[in-house]
Image (cartoon, rainbow, N blue to C red):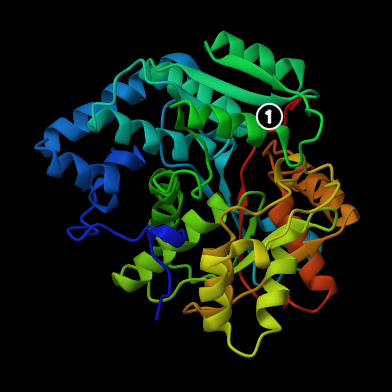
Amino acid sequence: MNLLDQNSGWLGLPSEANWEIETDESELNPFIRHRKLLWSYDLANTNGLTDEDFVNLVRDLDEEVSQIAKVGFRETPFVYLSALSEAIGQNGGIWAKNETVNVGGSHKARHLFGLALHLEIKEVPKNKPLTIASCGNAALAASIIAKAAKRPLTVNVPTWAETSLLDELSNNGAQIQICERRDGESGDPCILRFRELLDEGALPFGCQATENIWTIDGGKTLGFELSDQFRKTNLEPDRLLVQVGGGALASSAMQALTEANELGVLKTRPSLNTVQAEGCSPLLLAFNQITASDNYSESISEAISNPLKYMKPWENPSSIATGILDDITYDWIPLVWDMLMGSRPGGPLNASEEDIISAKNLIDMHTDISASATGTAGLAGLLAGKKDDCISSEDSIVILLTGIERDF
Protein backbone atom coordinates (compact mmCIF):
# COMPACT_ATOMS: atom_id res chain seq x y z
CA MET A 1 0.00 0.00 0.00
CA ASN A 2 1.27 3.47 -0.90
CA LEU A 3 1.66 5.54 2.26
CA LEU A 4 2.23 8.75 0.32
CA ASP A 5 0.04 11.53 -1.01
CA GLN A 6 0.59 14.97 -2.50
CA ASN A 7 1.64 16.35 0.89
CA SER A 8 4.54 13.89 0.94
CA GLY A 9 5.55 14.21 -2.71
CA TRP A 10 3.40 11.61 -4.49
CA LEU A 11 1.38 13.47 -7.11
CA GLY A 12 -0.87 10.62 -8.23
CA LEU A 13 -3.23 10.75 -11.20
CA PRO A 14 -6.43 12.77 -11.65
CA SER A 15 -9.60 10.73 -11.15
CA GLU A 16 -10.46 10.90 -14.87
CA ALA A 17 -6.95 10.07 -16.09
CA ASN A 18 -6.50 7.42 -18.75
CA TRP A 19 -3.84 6.25 -21.20
CA GLU A 20 -5.80 7.36 -24.22
CA ILE A 21 -2.86 8.94 -26.02
CA GLU A 22 -2.96 10.92 -29.22
CA THR A 23 -3.24 8.29 -31.97
CA ASP A 24 -1.60 10.48 -34.60
CA GLU A 25 2.02 9.30 -34.51
CA SER A 26 3.13 12.66 -35.91
CA GLU A 27 2.07 14.30 -32.62
CA LEU A 28 5.25 14.21 -30.58
CA ASN A 29 4.58 16.95 -28.04
CA PRO A 30 4.35 15.02 -24.74
CA PHE A 31 2.06 17.60 -23.16
CA ILE A 32 -0.47 16.91 -25.91
CA ARG A 33 0.21 13.22 -26.47
CA HIS A 34 -0.14 12.39 -22.76
CA ARG A 35 -2.48 15.22 -21.77
CA LYS A 36 -5.17 12.95 -20.31
CA LEU A 37 -2.70 11.88 -17.62
CA LEU A 38 -1.82 15.43 -16.59
CA TRP A 39 -3.21 17.47 -13.73
CA SER A 40 -2.99 20.57 -15.91
CA TYR A 41 -5.48 18.94 -18.29
CA ASP A 42 -7.73 18.00 -15.38
CA LEU A 43 -7.55 21.59 -14.13
CA ALA A 44 -8.44 22.86 -17.59
CA ASN A 45 -11.52 20.62 -17.68
CA THR A 46 -12.54 21.75 -14.20
CA ASN A 47 -12.23 25.38 -15.30
CA GLY A 48 -14.45 24.85 -18.33
CA LEU A 49 -11.83 24.55 -21.06
CA THR A 50 -12.43 22.08 -23.87
CA ASP A 51 -9.93 19.54 -25.14
CA GLU A 52 -9.28 21.82 -28.11
CA ASP A 53 -8.71 24.77 -25.79
CA PHE A 54 -6.04 22.85 -23.88
CA VAL A 55 -4.29 21.65 -27.03
CA ASN A 56 -4.25 25.19 -28.41
CA LEU A 57 -2.86 26.51 -25.12
CA VAL A 58 -0.02 23.99 -25.24
CA ARG A 59 0.72 24.71 -28.89
CA ASP A 60 0.75 28.49 -28.38
CA LEU A 61 3.07 28.32 -25.37
CA ASP A 62 5.29 25.75 -27.08
CA GLU A 63 5.58 28.04 -30.11
CA GLU A 64 6.83 30.82 -27.85
CA VAL A 65 9.33 28.38 -26.30
CA SER A 66 10.52 27.39 -29.78
CA GLN A 67 11.15 31.01 -30.70
CA ILE A 68 13.42 31.41 -27.68
CA ALA A 69 15.12 28.02 -27.40
CA LYS A 70 15.12 27.14 -31.14
CA VAL A 71 13.42 23.87 -30.22
CA GLY A 72 10.04 22.98 -28.72
CA PHE A 73 8.83 20.01 -26.71
CA ARG A 74 9.06 16.74 -28.59
CA GLU A 75 9.47 13.13 -27.54
CA THR A 76 13.20 12.69 -26.89
CA PRO A 77 15.17 9.75 -28.32
CA PHE A 78 15.46 6.38 -26.61
CA VAL A 79 18.53 4.58 -27.90
CA TYR A 80 20.37 1.30 -27.40
CA LEU A 81 24.03 1.93 -26.59
CA SER A 82 25.55 -1.18 -28.12
CA ALA A 83 29.18 -0.02 -28.19
CA LEU A 84 29.01 1.15 -24.58
CA SER A 85 27.32 -2.08 -23.45
CA GLU A 86 30.10 -4.10 -25.05
CA ALA A 87 32.85 -1.83 -23.72
CA ILE A 88 31.90 -2.35 -20.07
CA GLY A 89 30.64 -5.91 -20.42
CA GLN A 90 26.98 -5.20 -19.69
CA ASN A 91 25.55 -8.24 -21.46
CA GLY A 92 21.97 -7.31 -20.59
CA GLY A 93 22.41 -4.06 -22.51
CA ILE A 94 22.27 -0.34 -21.78
CA TRP A 95 19.58 1.97 -23.15
CA ALA A 96 19.53 5.74 -22.76
CA LYS A 97 16.90 8.45 -22.81
CA ASN A 98 18.62 11.43 -24.44
CA GLU A 99 17.38 14.63 -22.81
CA THR A 100 20.30 16.73 -24.06
CA VAL A 101 18.24 17.59 -27.15
CA ASN A 102 15.31 18.87 -25.10
CA VAL A 103 14.41 22.51 -24.48
CA GLY A 104 17.34 24.19 -22.73
CA GLY A 105 19.53 21.11 -23.18
CA SER A 106 18.09 19.13 -20.26
CA HIS A 107 14.95 17.62 -18.74
CA LYS A 108 14.38 20.62 -16.47
CA ALA A 109 12.11 22.52 -18.85
CA ARG A 110 9.54 19.70 -18.63
CA HIS A 111 8.94 20.60 -14.99
CA LEU A 112 8.71 24.32 -15.68
CA PHE A 113 6.43 24.00 -18.71
CA GLY A 114 4.04 21.99 -16.57
CA LEU A 115 4.04 24.76 -13.96
CA ALA A 116 3.48 27.39 -16.64
CA LEU A 117 0.41 25.53 -17.90
CA HIS A 118 -1.06 25.56 -14.40
CA LEU A 119 -0.47 29.32 -14.13
CA GLU A 120 -2.11 29.98 -17.49
CA ILE A 121 -5.15 27.81 -16.76
CA LYS A 122 -5.62 29.38 -13.32
CA GLU A 123 -5.35 32.79 -15.01
CA VAL A 124 -2.72 33.93 -12.53
CA PRO A 125 -1.99 37.60 -13.34
CA LYS A 126 0.93 38.02 -15.72
CA ASN A 127 2.68 40.44 -13.35
CA LYS A 128 2.76 37.93 -10.49
CA PRO A 129 6.49 37.42 -9.76
CA LEU A 130 8.09 33.98 -10.04
CA THR A 131 11.32 32.86 -8.40
CA ILE A 132 13.80 29.98 -8.41
CA ALA A 133 17.06 29.13 -6.63
CA SER A 134 19.44 27.58 -9.16
CA CYS A 135 22.75 28.15 -10.91
CA GLY A 136 22.44 25.59 -13.70
CA ASN A 137 20.03 23.93 -16.08
CA ALA A 138 16.97 24.58 -13.92
CA ALA A 139 17.69 28.32 -13.92
CA LEU A 140 18.13 28.36 -17.69
CA ALA A 141 14.94 26.35 -18.23
CA ALA A 142 12.98 28.60 -15.87
CA SER A 143 14.16 31.70 -17.74
CA ILE A 144 13.13 30.22 -21.10
CA ILE A 145 9.67 29.16 -19.94
CA ALA A 146 9.03 32.37 -17.98
CA LYS A 147 9.97 34.46 -21.01
CA ALA A 148 7.73 32.32 -23.23
CA ALA A 149 4.86 32.80 -20.77
CA LYS A 150 5.67 36.53 -20.47
CA ARG A 151 6.06 36.33 -16.71
CA PRO A 152 8.68 38.06 -14.48
CA LEU A 153 11.29 35.76 -12.94
CA THR A 154 13.95 36.31 -10.29
CA VAL A 155 16.78 33.76 -10.24
CA ASN A 156 18.72 33.43 -6.98
CA VAL A 157 22.29 32.40 -7.77
CA PRO A 158 25.47 31.93 -5.71
CA THR A 159 28.43 34.30 -5.91
CA TRP A 160 30.36 31.78 -8.00
CA ALA A 161 27.72 31.32 -10.71
CA GLU A 162 29.20 31.12 -14.21
CA THR A 163 29.15 34.31 -16.26
CA SER A 164 27.94 32.35 -19.30
CA LEU A 165 24.81 31.33 -17.39
CA LEU A 166 24.19 34.83 -16.08
CA ASP A 167 24.42 36.18 -19.61
CA GLU A 168 21.82 33.70 -20.85
CA LEU A 169 19.50 34.47 -17.95
CA SER A 170 19.78 38.18 -18.66
CA ASN A 171 19.14 37.62 -22.35
CA ASN A 172 15.92 35.83 -21.39
CA GLY A 173 14.80 38.77 -19.28
CA ALA A 174 15.31 37.22 -15.85
CA GLN A 175 16.24 39.34 -12.87
CA ILE A 176 19.35 37.94 -11.18
CA GLN A 177 19.91 38.09 -7.43
CA ILE A 178 23.48 37.26 -6.36
CA CYS A 179 23.20 35.60 -2.96
CA GLU A 180 26.06 36.23 -0.56
CA ARG A 181 26.10 34.62 2.85
CA ARG A 182 25.02 37.09 5.52
CA ASP A 183 26.56 37.26 8.98
CA GLY A 184 24.99 34.86 11.42
CA GLU A 185 22.91 32.86 8.95
CA SER A 186 23.21 29.17 8.12
CA GLY A 187 21.97 27.20 5.13
CA ASP A 188 22.14 27.83 1.41
CA PRO A 189 21.97 31.62 0.83
CA CYS A 190 20.17 31.07 -2.49
CA ILE A 191 17.42 29.08 -0.80
CA LEU A 192 17.17 31.68 1.97
CA ARG A 193 16.75 34.54 -0.53
CA PHE A 194 14.32 32.39 -2.53
CA ARG A 195 12.15 31.86 0.53
CA GLU A 196 12.26 35.55 1.38
CA LEU A 197 10.80 36.30 -2.04
CA LEU A 198 8.09 33.68 -1.45
CA ASP A 199 7.22 35.45 1.80
CA GLU A 200 6.90 38.67 -0.20
CA GLY A 201 4.38 37.06 -2.54
CA ALA A 202 6.40 35.45 -5.33
CA LEU A 203 5.45 32.00 -6.61
CA PRO A 204 7.92 29.08 -6.61
CA PHE A 205 8.96 28.30 -10.18
CA GLY A 206 11.49 25.52 -9.83
CA CYS A 207 12.02 21.77 -9.79
CA GLN A 208 11.45 20.98 -6.12
CA ALA A 209 8.16 19.30 -5.33
CA THR A 210 8.60 20.28 -1.69
CA GLU A 211 8.09 23.89 -2.84
CA ASN A 212 5.53 23.23 -5.61
CA ILE A 213 4.10 19.72 -6.06
CA TRP A 214 2.89 20.55 -9.58
CA THR A 215 6.49 20.48 -10.82
CA ILE A 216 6.08 16.69 -10.85
CA ASP A 217 3.23 17.00 -13.37
CA GLY A 218 5.44 18.16 -16.23
CA GLY A 219 8.34 15.99 -15.10
CA LYS A 220 6.20 12.87 -15.43
CA THR A 221 6.04 13.34 -19.21
CA LEU A 222 9.53 11.84 -19.32
CA GLY A 223 8.29 8.68 -17.62
CA PHE A 224 5.21 8.53 -19.83
CA GLU A 225 7.44 8.74 -22.90
CA LEU A 226 9.67 6.00 -21.51
CA SER A 227 6.64 3.78 -20.95
CA ASP A 228 5.63 4.19 -24.60
CA GLN A 229 9.19 3.55 -25.72
CA PHE A 230 9.50 0.40 -23.59
CA ARG A 231 6.28 -0.87 -25.09
CA LYS A 232 7.24 -0.07 -28.68
CA THR A 233 10.61 -1.82 -28.32
CA ASN A 234 9.21 -4.77 -26.31
CA LEU A 235 11.70 -3.92 -23.59
CA GLU A 236 11.20 -4.88 -19.95
CA PRO A 237 14.33 -3.40 -18.37
CA ASP A 238 15.56 -4.61 -15.01
CA ARG A 239 16.81 -1.30 -13.69
CA LEU A 240 16.42 2.45 -14.14
CA LEU A 241 19.44 4.36 -12.85
CA VAL A 242 18.78 8.04 -12.18
CA GLN A 243 21.20 10.67 -10.93
CA VAL A 244 19.81 12.59 -7.97
CA GLY A 245 20.38 16.11 -6.74
CA GLY A 246 17.10 17.51 -5.47
CA GLY A 247 15.29 14.32 -6.49
CA ALA A 248 12.41 15.58 -8.67
CA LEU A 249 13.69 13.89 -11.84
CA ALA A 250 13.86 10.45 -10.24
CA SER A 251 10.57 10.95 -8.41
CA SER A 252 8.73 12.09 -11.56
CA ALA A 253 10.05 9.27 -13.73
CA MET A 254 9.41 6.62 -11.08
CA GLN A 255 5.86 7.81 -10.41
CA ALA A 256 5.00 7.83 -14.13
CA LEU A 257 6.38 4.32 -14.66
CA THR A 258 4.51 3.06 -11.61
CA GLU A 259 1.27 4.49 -12.98
CA ALA A 260 1.90 3.00 -16.43
CA ASN A 261 2.29 -0.37 -14.73
CA GLU A 262 -0.86 0.09 -12.64
CA LEU A 263 -2.85 1.13 -15.73
CA GLY A 264 -1.71 -2.01 -17.55
CA VAL A 265 0.41 -0.20 -20.13
CA LEU A 266 3.53 -1.93 -18.81
CA LYS A 267 3.54 -5.52 -17.58
CA THR A 268 6.28 -4.58 -15.17
CA ARG A 269 8.44 -1.58 -14.42
CA PRO A 270 12.17 -1.43 -13.71
CA SER A 271 13.61 -1.19 -10.24
CA LEU A 272 14.83 2.29 -9.33
CA ASN A 273 18.44 2.85 -8.39
CA THR A 274 19.23 6.43 -7.44
CA VAL A 275 22.78 7.67 -8.00
CA GLN A 276 24.68 10.25 -6.00
CA ALA A 277 28.35 11.18 -5.76
CA GLU A 278 30.44 10.03 -2.82
CA GLY A 279 31.11 13.71 -2.22
CA CYS A 280 27.41 14.43 -1.69
CA SER A 281 25.14 11.54 -0.67
CA PRO A 282 22.42 12.78 1.69
CA LEU A 283 19.87 10.40 0.18
CA LEU A 284 22.03 7.37 0.98
CA LEU A 285 22.30 8.41 4.63
CA ALA A 286 18.54 8.88 4.94
CA PHE A 287 17.88 5.55 3.20
CA ASN A 288 20.28 3.73 5.52
CA GLN A 289 18.66 5.29 8.57
CA ILE A 290 15.23 4.09 7.43
CA THR A 291 16.51 0.59 6.65
CA ALA A 292 18.12 0.38 10.10
CA SER A 293 14.67 0.64 11.69
CA ASP A 294 12.51 -2.32 12.65
CA ASN A 295 9.51 -1.07 10.69
CA TYR A 296 9.93 0.72 7.35
CA SER A 297 6.34 1.94 7.24
CA GLU A 298 6.53 3.51 10.68
CA SER A 299 9.85 5.17 9.89
CA ILE A 300 8.61 6.59 6.59
CA SER A 301 5.46 7.86 8.29
CA GLU A 302 7.65 9.54 10.88
CA ALA A 303 9.82 10.99 8.10
CA ILE A 304 6.74 12.55 6.50
CA SER A 305 5.95 14.45 9.70
CA ASN A 306 9.58 15.09 10.69
CA PRO A 307 11.79 14.86 7.56
CA LEU A 308 14.82 16.54 9.14
CA LYS A 309 15.21 13.62 11.53
CA TYR A 310 16.34 11.56 8.54
CA MET A 311 17.37 14.01 5.81
CA LYS A 312 20.25 16.12 7.06
CA PRO A 313 22.27 18.67 5.04
CA TRP A 314 25.51 17.33 3.57
CA GLU A 315 28.52 19.41 4.57
CA ASN A 316 30.86 20.63 1.82
CA PRO A 317 29.39 18.88 -1.26
CA SER A 318 32.05 18.11 -3.85
CA SER A 319 32.08 16.53 -7.33
CA ILE A 320 32.62 17.42 -10.97
CA ALA A 321 28.95 16.42 -11.35
CA THR A 322 27.96 19.84 -10.06
CA GLY A 323 24.28 19.48 -10.95
CA ILE A 324 23.72 16.84 -8.26
CA LEU A 325 25.38 18.64 -5.37
CA ASP A 326 22.22 19.67 -3.54
CA ASP A 327 23.10 19.42 0.14
CA ILE A 328 19.58 18.11 0.76
CA THR A 329 17.64 15.71 -1.45
CA TYR A 330 14.39 17.64 -1.26
CA ASP A 331 12.10 15.05 -2.87
CA TRP A 332 13.58 12.08 -1.06
CA ILE A 333 10.58 10.48 0.64
CA PRO A 334 8.94 9.06 -2.53
CA LEU A 335 12.33 7.70 -3.61
CA VAL A 336 13.02 5.89 -0.35
CA TRP A 337 9.46 4.59 -0.18
CA ASP A 338 9.67 3.20 -3.71
CA MET A 339 13.12 1.65 -3.31
CA LEU A 340 12.05 -0.09 -0.09
CA MET A 341 8.33 -0.74 -0.45
CA GLY A 342 7.40 -0.23 -4.10
CA SER A 343 6.41 -2.94 -6.57
CA ARG A 344 10.05 -3.35 -7.71
CA PRO A 345 12.37 -2.48 -4.81
CA GLY A 346 15.75 -0.99 -5.67
CA GLY A 347 18.26 1.07 -3.73
CA PRO A 348 20.69 3.99 -3.76
CA LEU A 349 24.09 3.79 -5.44
CA ASN A 350 27.13 5.81 -4.45
CA ALA A 351 29.53 6.72 -7.28
CA SER A 352 33.16 7.58 -6.65
CA GLU A 353 34.72 10.55 -8.43
CA GLU A 354 36.67 8.03 -10.52
CA ASP A 355 33.38 6.42 -11.60
CA ILE A 356 31.88 9.82 -12.45
CA ILE A 357 34.86 10.79 -14.59
CA SER A 358 34.92 7.36 -16.27
CA ALA A 359 31.20 7.54 -17.06
CA LYS A 360 31.62 10.91 -18.77
CA ASN A 361 34.55 9.61 -20.80
CA LEU A 362 32.73 6.41 -21.78
CA ILE A 363 29.73 8.34 -23.11
CA ASP A 364 32.10 10.60 -25.06
CA MET A 365 33.97 7.63 -26.53
CA HIS A 366 31.12 5.27 -27.32
CA THR A 367 28.19 7.53 -28.26
CA ASP A 368 27.59 10.69 -30.26
CA ILE A 369 25.78 12.33 -27.32
CA SER A 370 27.41 15.39 -25.74
CA ALA A 371 26.41 15.14 -22.09
CA SER A 372 27.86 16.71 -18.95
CA ALA A 373 29.31 14.81 -16.00
CA THR A 374 26.01 15.43 -14.22
CA GLY A 375 24.08 14.15 -17.22
CA THR A 376 26.11 10.92 -17.35
CA ALA A 377 26.11 10.24 -13.60
CA GLY A 378 23.53 7.47 -13.97
CA LEU A 379 26.17 5.48 -15.83
CA ALA A 380 28.60 6.21 -13.00
CA GLY A 381 26.14 4.47 -10.70
CA LEU A 382 26.20 1.43 -12.97
CA LEU A 383 30.00 1.31 -12.82
CA ALA A 384 29.86 1.53 -9.03
CA GLY A 385 27.12 -1.09 -8.78
CA LYS A 386 29.04 -3.55 -10.93
CA LYS A 387 32.14 -3.15 -8.78
CA ASP A 388 30.13 -3.79 -5.62
CA ASP A 389 28.26 -6.75 -7.17
CA CYS A 390 24.97 -4.91 -6.62
CA ILE A 391 24.20 -5.07 -10.34
CA SER A 392 24.61 -8.12 -12.54
CA SER A 393 26.18 -7.90 -15.98
CA GLU A 394 23.06 -9.69 -17.23
CA ASP A 395 20.72 -6.91 -16.05
CA SER A 396 19.16 -4.68 -18.70
CA ILE A 397 19.80 -1.07 -17.77
CA VAL A 398 18.17 2.26 -18.62
CA ILE A 399 19.99 5.52 -17.92
CA LEU A 400 18.92 9.13 -18.41
CA LEU A 401 21.39 11.42 -20.18
CA THR A 402 19.96 14.61 -18.82
CA GLY A 403 22.20 17.61 -19.43
CA ILE A 404 24.21 18.81 -22.41
CA GLU A 405 27.91 19.58 -21.99
CA ARG A 406 28.53 23.31 -21.47
CA ASP A 407 30.31 25.82 -19.22
CA PHE A 408 27.83 25.69 -16.33
Residue 261 lies left or right of residue 25; in this view the side is right
Q: Quadrant of residue 89?
A: bottom right
- Up the image or down, 77 lies above or below 181; here it is below
Q: Is residue 306 left or right of residue 148?
A: right
Residue 399, horizontal then vertical, whole percent:
62, 56
**Residue 351 occupies which quadrant of the picture?**
bottom right
Residue corresponding to mark 1: 135
What residue is drawn where x is 49% and y is 49%?
209
Residue 83: in sight, yes or no?
no
Residue sitting nearer the eye, 143 or 99: 143
**Residue 281 drawn at (x, y percent):** 77, 59
- Write down the quadrant of residue 151 in the picture: top left
Measuring 72% from the left and 75% from the top, which residue is drawn there?
288
Residue visible at 85% across and 72% down? 387
Secondary structure, mark 1, is loop
Q: Quadrant of the C terminus?
A: top right
- Work out which residue is located at the far front of the displayed protein and give it: 184
Residue toward you, 384 or 313: 313
Residue 222 vs residue 319: left or right?
A: left
Does 312 appear above or below 47?
A: below
Q: Is residue 349 above or below residue 327?
A: below
Res 363 visible: yes
> For the point 78% across and 44% down, which residue is it?
321
User: Which of 143/131 is in front?
Assistant: 131
* Amino acid type, label 1: Cys
